[in-house]
Image: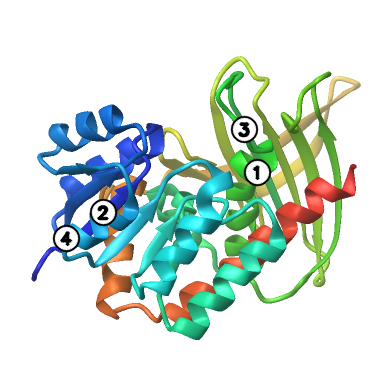
Protein backbone atom coordinates (compact mmCIF):
# COMPACT_ATOMS: atom_id res chain seq x y z
CA UNK A 1 0.00 0.00 0.00
CA UNK A 2 1.31 3.42 -0.97
CA UNK A 3 1.82 5.67 2.01
CA UNK A 4 -0.40 8.73 2.25
CA UNK A 5 1.56 11.97 2.05
CA UNK A 6 0.36 14.25 4.85
CA UNK A 7 1.17 17.92 5.49
CA UNK A 8 0.98 19.19 9.07
CA UNK A 9 0.11 22.86 9.54
CA UNK A 10 1.31 24.09 12.92
CA UNK A 11 4.60 23.19 14.59
CA UNK A 12 3.45 23.61 18.21
CA UNK A 13 2.68 20.88 20.73
CA UNK A 14 -0.15 19.17 18.82
CA UNK A 15 1.60 19.69 15.49
CA UNK A 16 4.65 17.94 16.91
CA UNK A 17 2.54 15.03 18.15
CA UNK A 18 0.77 14.67 14.82
CA UNK A 19 4.07 14.85 12.94
CA UNK A 20 5.49 12.03 15.05
CA UNK A 21 2.37 9.88 14.56
CA UNK A 22 2.46 10.45 10.81
CA UNK A 23 6.21 9.93 10.40
CA UNK A 24 6.16 6.66 12.36
CA UNK A 25 2.90 5.35 10.90
CA UNK A 26 2.83 2.33 8.63
CA UNK A 27 0.44 3.98 6.13
CA UNK A 28 1.50 7.63 6.30
CA UNK A 29 4.43 9.83 5.39
CA UNK A 30 5.15 13.31 6.72
CA UNK A 31 5.30 15.31 3.50
CA UNK A 32 5.90 18.74 5.05
CA UNK A 33 5.58 20.88 8.16
CA UNK A 34 4.14 24.38 7.82
CA UNK A 35 4.48 27.21 10.34
CA UNK A 36 4.94 30.96 9.98
CA UNK A 37 7.71 30.54 12.57
CA UNK A 38 10.20 29.02 10.14
CA UNK A 39 12.64 27.99 12.88
CA UNK A 40 9.99 25.86 14.56
CA UNK A 41 8.95 24.36 11.22
CA UNK A 42 12.56 23.58 10.29
CA UNK A 43 13.29 22.01 13.67
CA UNK A 44 10.27 19.71 13.46
CA UNK A 45 10.84 18.87 9.80
CA UNK A 46 14.49 17.99 10.45
CA UNK A 47 13.52 15.79 13.36
CA UNK A 48 11.30 13.68 11.12
CA UNK A 49 13.31 14.01 7.90
CA UNK A 50 10.71 16.13 6.15
CA UNK A 51 10.48 19.59 4.55
CA UNK A 52 9.65 22.91 6.17
CA UNK A 53 7.58 25.75 4.74
CA UNK A 54 6.34 29.07 6.08
CA UNK A 55 3.05 28.95 4.13
CA UNK A 56 0.53 26.27 3.21
CA UNK A 57 0.41 27.51 -0.39
CA UNK A 58 4.16 26.91 -0.70
CA UNK A 59 3.92 23.42 0.78
CA UNK A 60 1.04 22.35 -1.46
CA UNK A 61 2.76 23.73 -4.56
CA UNK A 62 5.96 21.82 -3.82
CA UNK A 63 4.52 18.44 -2.86
CA UNK A 64 2.05 15.79 -3.95
CA UNK A 65 -0.30 15.85 -0.97
CA UNK A 66 -2.96 13.31 0.03
CA UNK A 67 -4.11 15.01 3.21
CA UNK A 68 -3.60 17.94 5.57
CA UNK A 69 -3.65 18.08 9.37
CA UNK A 70 -4.58 21.48 10.81
CA UNK A 71 -2.97 21.82 14.25
CA UNK A 72 -2.76 25.59 14.57
CA UNK A 73 -4.51 27.92 17.00
CA UNK A 74 -8.30 27.61 16.96
CA UNK A 75 -8.67 31.16 15.62
CA UNK A 76 -6.85 30.21 12.41
CA UNK A 77 -8.74 26.97 11.69
CA UNK A 78 -11.42 28.57 9.54
CA UNK A 79 -9.18 30.19 6.94
CA UNK A 80 -6.78 27.25 6.69
CA UNK A 81 -9.50 24.59 6.55
CA UNK A 82 -11.44 26.53 3.94
CA UNK A 83 -8.35 26.78 1.72
CA UNK A 84 -7.65 23.06 2.04
CA UNK A 85 -11.25 22.07 1.25
CA UNK A 86 -11.39 24.41 -1.76
CA UNK A 87 -8.28 22.68 -3.08
CA UNK A 88 -10.09 19.34 -2.75
CA UNK A 89 -7.68 17.88 -0.20
CA UNK A 90 -8.93 15.70 2.69
CA UNK A 91 -8.24 17.24 6.09
CA UNK A 92 -8.13 16.51 9.78
CA UNK A 93 -8.77 19.59 11.93
CA UNK A 94 -7.80 19.60 15.60
CA UNK A 95 -10.76 20.17 17.90
CA UNK A 96 -12.70 22.31 17.84
CA UNK A 97 -13.14 22.70 14.10
CA UNK A 98 -13.84 26.34 14.98
CA UNK A 99 -15.04 27.97 18.20
CA UNK A 100 -18.15 29.34 16.50
CA UNK A 101 -21.01 27.05 15.53
CA UNK A 102 -21.90 29.00 12.38
CA UNK A 103 -18.39 28.75 10.94
CA UNK A 104 -18.10 25.09 11.95
CA UNK A 105 -21.35 24.41 10.13
CA UNK A 106 -20.07 26.43 7.16
CA UNK A 107 -16.92 24.29 6.87
CA UNK A 108 -18.84 21.03 7.17
CA UNK A 109 -21.27 22.19 4.51
CA UNK A 110 -18.40 23.25 2.24
CA UNK A 111 -16.77 19.85 2.77
CA UNK A 112 -20.04 18.14 1.81
CA UNK A 113 -20.62 20.30 -1.27
CA UNK A 114 -17.03 19.86 -2.47
CA UNK A 115 -17.13 16.12 -1.62
CA UNK A 116 -13.96 16.49 0.47
CA UNK A 117 -13.47 14.19 3.50
CA UNK A 118 -13.09 15.97 6.84
CA UNK A 119 -12.20 14.69 10.31
CA UNK A 120 -12.00 16.37 13.71
CA UNK A 121 -9.36 15.59 16.34
CA UNK A 122 -11.65 13.66 18.67
CA UNK A 123 -8.75 11.45 19.66
CA UNK A 124 -10.57 9.71 22.54
CA UNK A 125 -12.70 7.90 19.97
CA UNK A 126 -9.56 5.86 19.34
CA UNK A 127 -8.61 5.23 22.97
CA UNK A 128 -8.41 1.41 23.37
CA UNK A 129 -10.10 1.66 26.79
CA UNK A 130 -13.10 3.45 25.28
CA UNK A 131 -13.31 0.92 22.47
CA UNK A 132 -13.09 -1.98 24.92
CA UNK A 133 -15.83 -0.61 27.19
CA UNK A 134 -18.11 0.05 24.22
CA UNK A 135 -17.51 -3.51 23.03
CA UNK A 136 -18.66 -4.95 26.38
CA UNK A 137 -21.79 -2.81 26.71
CA UNK A 138 -24.86 -4.78 25.66
CA UNK A 139 -27.58 -2.63 27.22
CA UNK A 140 -28.45 1.09 27.11
CA UNK A 141 -26.58 3.71 29.10
CA UNK A 142 -28.44 5.18 32.08
CA UNK A 143 -25.80 7.48 33.54
CA UNK A 144 -22.51 8.74 32.10
CA UNK A 145 -20.02 10.55 34.36
CA UNK A 146 -16.67 12.05 33.35
CA UNK A 147 -13.90 14.04 35.01
CA UNK A 148 -11.31 15.67 32.76
CA UNK A 149 -9.13 17.89 34.93
CA UNK A 150 -5.69 19.35 34.29
CA UNK A 151 -3.30 21.77 35.98
CA UNK A 152 -3.27 25.41 34.88
CA UNK A 153 -2.26 25.87 31.25
CA UNK A 154 -1.08 29.47 30.68
CA UNK A 155 -0.85 28.91 26.91
CA UNK A 156 -4.54 27.96 26.53
CA UNK A 157 -6.51 30.47 24.45
CA UNK A 158 -9.79 28.59 23.94
CA UNK A 159 -12.49 27.93 26.52
CA UNK A 160 -12.04 24.80 28.60
CA UNK A 161 -15.29 23.65 26.99
CA UNK A 162 -13.66 23.50 23.54
CA UNK A 163 -10.28 22.41 24.91
CA UNK A 164 -11.32 19.58 27.25
CA UNK A 165 -15.06 19.14 27.78
CA UNK A 166 -15.82 18.59 24.09
CA UNK A 167 -13.92 15.28 24.23
CA UNK A 168 -16.26 13.93 26.88
CA UNK A 169 -19.31 15.33 25.11
CA UNK A 170 -18.23 13.26 22.12
CA UNK A 171 -17.59 10.14 24.21
CA UNK A 172 -20.93 10.49 26.01
CA UNK A 173 -22.69 10.56 22.65
CA UNK A 174 -20.80 7.44 21.60
CA UNK A 175 -21.78 5.53 24.76
CA UNK A 176 -25.36 6.67 24.41
CA UNK A 177 -25.38 5.49 20.83
CA UNK A 178 -26.44 8.78 19.23
CA UNK A 179 -29.99 7.42 18.97
CA UNK A 180 -31.92 10.18 20.73
CA UNK A 181 -31.39 13.90 20.65
CA UNK A 182 -30.13 15.68 23.73
CA UNK A 183 -33.29 17.12 25.28
CA UNK A 184 -31.74 19.53 27.80
CA UNK A 185 -28.38 20.93 28.86
CA UNK A 186 -27.59 22.67 32.15
CA UNK A 187 -24.13 24.10 32.75
CA UNK A 188 -22.09 26.22 35.12
CA UNK A 189 -18.80 27.74 33.95
CA UNK A 190 -16.14 29.62 35.88
CA UNK A 191 -13.99 32.36 34.37
CA UNK A 192 -11.12 33.86 36.40
CA UNK A 193 -11.17 37.59 37.06
CA UNK A 194 -9.83 39.56 34.09
CA UNK A 195 -9.65 36.38 31.97
CA UNK A 196 -11.23 36.00 28.54
CA UNK A 197 -12.23 32.32 28.63
CA UNK A 198 -13.74 29.76 31.00
CA UNK A 199 -11.35 27.56 32.97
CA UNK A 200 -13.89 25.29 34.70
CA UNK A 201 -17.09 23.86 33.25
CA UNK A 202 -19.57 21.38 34.72
CA UNK A 203 -22.62 20.35 32.76
CA UNK A 204 -25.47 17.84 32.77
CA UNK A 205 -27.01 16.61 29.54
CA UNK A 206 -30.33 14.80 29.50
CA UNK A 207 -31.27 12.57 26.59
CA UNK A 208 -34.74 12.01 25.20
CA UNK A 209 -34.80 8.48 26.66
CA UNK A 210 -34.24 9.85 30.18
CA UNK A 211 -30.57 8.92 30.54
CA UNK A 212 -28.17 11.62 31.71
CA UNK A 213 -24.52 12.56 31.32
CA UNK A 214 -22.64 14.54 33.99
CA UNK A 215 -19.40 16.09 32.73
CA UNK A 216 -16.70 18.04 34.56
CA UNK A 217 -13.74 19.78 32.94
CA UNK A 218 -11.14 21.99 34.58
CA UNK A 219 -7.79 23.65 33.90
CA UNK A 220 -7.44 24.57 37.57
CA UNK A 221 -6.58 21.14 38.98
CA UNK A 222 -3.44 19.85 40.64
CA UNK A 223 -3.09 16.70 38.55
CA UNK A 224 -4.23 15.28 35.26
CA UNK A 225 -7.42 13.20 35.52
CA UNK A 226 -9.20 11.46 32.65
CA UNK A 227 -11.90 9.26 34.16
CA UNK A 228 -15.19 8.01 32.73
CA UNK A 229 -17.90 5.95 34.41
CA UNK A 230 -20.91 4.49 32.63
CA UNK A 231 -23.88 2.93 34.42
CA UNK A 232 -26.35 0.57 32.76
CA UNK A 233 -29.19 -1.43 34.35
CA UNK A 234 -26.82 -4.18 35.50
CA UNK A 235 -23.25 -2.92 35.24
CA UNK A 236 -20.86 -0.10 36.08
CA UNK A 237 -17.98 0.53 33.67
CA UNK A 238 -14.99 2.43 35.03
CA UNK A 239 -12.74 3.65 32.23
CA UNK A 240 -9.33 5.16 32.98
CA UNK A 241 -8.35 6.98 29.81
CA UNK A 242 -4.82 7.76 31.01
CA UNK A 243 -3.86 4.28 32.18
CA UNK A 244 -5.96 2.77 29.40
CA UNK A 245 -7.81 0.20 31.46
CA UNK A 246 -11.41 -0.85 32.13
CA UNK A 247 -13.04 -2.30 35.24
CA UNK A 248 -16.58 -3.68 35.13
CA UNK A 249 -18.73 -4.10 38.26
CA UNK A 250 -21.94 -6.10 38.70
CA UNK A 251 -23.74 -6.00 42.04
CA UNK A 252 -25.35 -9.37 42.77
CA UNK A 253 -26.50 -9.02 46.37
CA UNK A 254 -27.00 -6.47 49.12
CA UNK A 255 -28.65 -6.99 52.49
CA UNK A 256 -28.91 -5.78 56.04
CA UNK A 257 -27.54 -8.37 58.46
CA UNK A 258 -28.83 -8.53 62.05
CA UNK A 259 -26.36 -9.86 64.58
CA UNK A 260 -26.22 -9.46 68.34
CA UNK A 261 -28.79 -6.71 68.34
CA UNK A 262 -26.92 -4.60 65.81
CA UNK A 263 -27.43 -4.14 62.10
CA UNK A 264 -24.76 -4.08 59.43
CA UNK A 265 -24.80 -3.79 55.65
CA UNK A 266 -23.43 -6.45 53.37
CA UNK A 267 -22.98 -6.38 49.60
CA UNK A 268 -21.50 -8.71 47.02
CA UNK A 269 -20.15 -7.40 43.72
CA UNK A 270 -18.55 -9.22 40.81
CA UNK A 271 -15.51 -7.38 39.45
CA UNK A 272 -14.23 -8.01 35.93
CA UNK A 273 -11.06 -6.49 34.47
CA UNK A 274 -11.23 -7.26 30.75
CA UNK A 275 -8.12 -7.38 28.60
CA UNK A 276 -7.64 -4.10 26.72
CA UNK A 277 -6.04 -4.71 23.37
CA UNK A 278 -3.39 -2.02 22.91
CA UNK A 279 -3.28 -1.68 19.15
CA UNK A 280 -1.38 1.61 19.42
CA UNK A 281 -1.60 5.04 20.97
CA UNK A 282 -4.89 6.87 20.26
CA UNK A 283 -3.20 9.51 18.08
CA UNK A 284 -1.61 6.84 15.87
CA UNK A 285 -4.94 4.99 15.59
CA UNK A 286 -6.61 8.28 14.67
CA UNK A 287 -4.06 8.77 11.89
CA UNK A 288 -4.72 5.25 10.60
CA UNK A 289 -8.41 6.18 10.48
CA UNK A 290 -7.57 9.36 8.56
CA UNK A 291 -5.53 7.33 6.07
CA UNK A 292 -8.49 5.00 5.52
CA UNK A 293 -10.81 7.99 5.13
CA UNK A 294 -8.50 9.37 2.42
CA UNK A 295 -8.45 5.97 0.68
CA UNK A 296 -12.24 5.78 0.63
CA UNK A 297 -12.40 2.78 2.98
CA UNK A 298 -14.52 4.90 5.34
CA UNK A 299 -17.64 6.72 4.19
CA UNK A 300 -16.84 10.47 4.41
CA UNK A 301 -20.54 11.30 4.80
CA UNK A 302 -20.85 9.05 7.88
CA UNK A 303 -17.70 10.60 9.36
CA UNK A 304 -18.93 14.13 8.69
CA UNK A 305 -22.31 13.43 10.28
CA UNK A 306 -20.66 12.75 13.67
CA UNK A 307 -18.88 16.11 13.89
CA UNK A 308 -21.54 18.81 14.26
CA UNK A 309 -23.44 17.61 17.34
CA UNK A 310 -20.49 17.78 19.80
CA UNK A 311 -19.85 21.36 18.62
CA UNK A 312 -23.54 22.26 19.00
CA UNK A 313 -23.58 20.97 22.56
CA UNK A 314 -20.29 22.71 23.40
CA UNK A 315 -21.63 26.05 22.21
CA UNK A 316 -24.82 25.55 24.24
CA UNK A 317 -22.70 24.82 27.34
CA UNK A 318 -20.73 28.03 26.85
CA UNK A 319 -23.85 30.13 26.26
CA UNK A 320 -26.00 28.56 28.96
CA UNK A 321 -24.08 30.10 31.84
CA UNK A 322 -23.22 33.43 30.24
The first of marks 2 and 4 along the sequence is 2
The first of marks 3 and 2 along the sequence is 2
Indicate which label's residue lies in the foreground, 1 or 2: 2
The tag on residue 58 is: 2
The first of marks 1 and 2 along the sequence is 2
The first of marks 3 and 4 along the sequence is 4
Camera sees residue 277: no
Residue in the image at 65% along x and 48% along y = 251
Q: Secondary structure at mark 3?
A: loop
Indicate which label's residue lies in the foreground, 3 or 4: 4
Residue in the image at 39% along x and 38% along y = 14
The tag on residue 11 is: none
The percent coordinates of residue 184 (x first, y second) are 87, 61
Contact (Cβ within 8 Å) of mark 4 with mark 1: no
Q: Nearer the viewer, residue 34 or 132?
A: 34
Residue 63 in the figure: left or right of residue 207: left
The percent coordinates of residue 280 (x first, y second) are 26, 47
Q: Secondary structure at mark 1?
A: helix
The percent coordinates of residue 179 (x first, y second) are 67, 76
- State the separation of the CA atoms marked 4 and 1: 36 Å
The first of marks 3 and 1 along the sequence is 3
- State the separation of the CA atoms marked 3 and 2: 28 Å
- State the separation of the CA atoms marked 3 and 4: 32 Å
Residue at which label 4 appears: 63
Residue at which label 3 appears: 157
- State the separation of the CA atoms marked 3 and 1: 15 Å
Residue at which label 1 appears: 165
Mark 3 packing: few (<14 Cα in 10 Å), some, or many (20+)? some
Amino acid sequence: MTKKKIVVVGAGGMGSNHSRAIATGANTELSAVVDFDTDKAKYLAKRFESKAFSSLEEALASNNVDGVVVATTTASHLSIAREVIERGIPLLVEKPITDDLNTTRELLELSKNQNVPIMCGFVERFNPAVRTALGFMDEPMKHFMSVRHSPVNPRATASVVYDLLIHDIDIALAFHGRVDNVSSIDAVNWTPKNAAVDEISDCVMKFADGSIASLSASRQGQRKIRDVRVVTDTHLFEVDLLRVNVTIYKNVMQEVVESGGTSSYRAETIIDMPFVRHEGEPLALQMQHFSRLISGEIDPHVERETLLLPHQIAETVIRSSN
